[in-house]
Image (tube, rainbow, N blue to C red):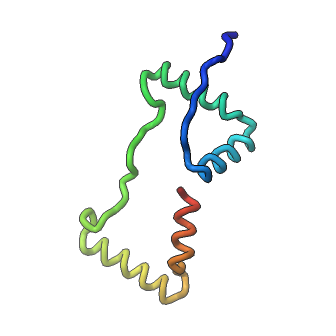
Amino acid sequence: MATKSANVTARVQPEIKRQAEAVLDRIGLPVSVLIDTLYRQIIMTGGVPYPLTVPKLPTRDSLTDEQFNTMMEKGCQQAKSGEGLSVDEAFAKIREDI
């Protein structure tokens, strides 16, 4: 086995690092093994081994008037029935998913 002597330094947001390392810890995978595996996949595939794309989210311009009105009506009904979230709750949920 070859001696590992090269270092990789990367700057990431502390919370992102904490969350990712918690997942890796749960599955018993050291960060160094993950990075080594990623580098090997880059070599084998000749590129990044997963798609780097922006997910397509619906925008007002991409919706028909009927689709937009249906979506807005659903949101209105949810708000009236108390199914909605406060602004603080909504942003907390968004932060969880990042």
Residue 87 position, x and y percent, is 50, 78
- Where the N terminus falls, by quadrant? top right
Of residues 70 and 42, the one drawn nearer to the viewer in this rendering: 42
Of residues 72 and 93, the one drawn nearer to the viewer in this rendering: 93
Above-or-below relation of 65 to 4: below
Q: Is residue 46 left or right of residue 9?
A: left
Q: Is residue 43 left or right of residue 73?
A: right
The mark total stands at: 0
Residue 30 position, x and y percent, is 71, 33
Q: Is residue 31 left or right of residue 39?
A: right
Above-or-below relation of 89 to 10: below
Residue 63: image quadrant is bottom left
Question: Residue at left 58%, top 28%?
Answer: 8
Residue 68 position, x and y percent, is 31, 73
Question: Residue at left 27%, top 74%?
Answer: 66
Question: Residue at left 73%, top 40%?
Answer: 27
From this viewpoint, which residue is outermost toward the bottom?
80
Of residues 69 and 29, the one drawn nearer to the viewer in this rendering: 29
Above-or-below relation of 54 to 82: above
Residue 12 position, x and y percent, is 55, 44
Question: Residue at left 56%, top 28%?
Answer: 38
Residue 46: image quadrant is top left
From this viewpoint, which residue is outermost toward the top?
1
